[in-house]
Image (spheres, rainbow, N blue to C red):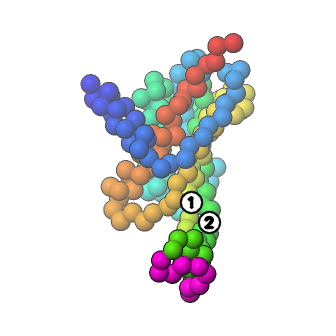
């Protein structure tokens, strides 16, 4: 029952979300055979600390939870069917809006008929950041990428750790909503 509530909550959140998701996969892979996963091992000298350790923990927990809801079991690297890795990137975007509030030709009779009026143009420039999370599933035996999903959204400041966890869970839920890919009948 608890699993059903979690799935329904994830579907509800992703249905009303502004997140942009996409995925791609190898159509030659039978995803019903993918039963176990492991995280790609980090190659750093000190793997206990990295720059954004809290966000890394949040992303990994959200992915673990979603993959387990999909029926995958976490395993050792040597025995896993797929290896999981993620990447993040932040792009700066610029939005330029121009508003014209001038009075032009009025084809109707009455006050203000004809040409005339004053003109005013206002331009606003807004810089914002778009964060993207990319999740890869790699065949553990061949090393080939078999599935890649991405989710992007405008970044907003979140004040509390709980809000940050909620944002990550929503993004990962939307990202993995259509995993495993549905096989097309040919």
Mark 2 or mark 1, earlier in chain: 2
Q: Residue placed at 62% from the left, 54% from the top?
A: 44
Q: Residue placed at 50% from the left, 61% from the top?
A: 155
The C terminus lies in which quarter of the figure?
Answer: top right
Magenta range is 110-118
Q: Secondary structure at mark 2?
A: strand
| Magenta region, main secondary structure | loop
Judging by the rendered image, the residue that carries numbered circle 1 is 130
Residue 184: name its quadrant. top right
Judging by the rendered image, the residue that carries numbered circle 2 is 93
Asked whether residue 88 appears in the rendered view, the answer is: yes
- Decide: is 153 above or below 81: below
In the rendered structure, does residue 150 fall within the stretch colored magenta?
Answer: no
Asked whether residue 40 appears in the rendered view, the answer is: no
Q: Residue furthest top?
A: 186
Relative to residue 159, is residue 100 drawn left or right? Answer: right
């Amino acid at each position: 029952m608890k699993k059903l509530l979690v799935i329904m909550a994830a579907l509800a959140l992703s249905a009303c979300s502004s997140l942009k998701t996409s995925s791609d996969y190898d159509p030659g892979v039978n995803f019903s055979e993918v039963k176990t996963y492991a995280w790609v091992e980090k190659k750093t000298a000190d793997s206990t600390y990295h720059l954004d350790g809290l966000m890394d923990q949040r992303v990994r927990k959200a992915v673990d939870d979603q993959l387990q809801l999909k029926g995958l079991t976490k395993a050792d690297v040597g025995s896993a069917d797929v290896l999981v890795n993620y990447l993040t990137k932040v792009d700066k975007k610029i939005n330029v809006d121009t508003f014209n509030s001038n009075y032009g030709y009025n084809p109707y009779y009455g006050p203000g008929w004809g040409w005339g009026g004053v003109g005013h143009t206002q331009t606003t420039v807004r810089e914002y950041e778009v964060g993207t999370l990319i999740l890869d599933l790699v065949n553990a035996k061949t090393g080939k990428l078999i599935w890649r999903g991405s989710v992007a959204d405008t970044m907003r400041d979140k004040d509390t750790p709980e809000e940050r966890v909620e944002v990550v869970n929503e993004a990962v839920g939307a990202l993995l909503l259509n995993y495993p890919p549905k096989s097309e009948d040919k």
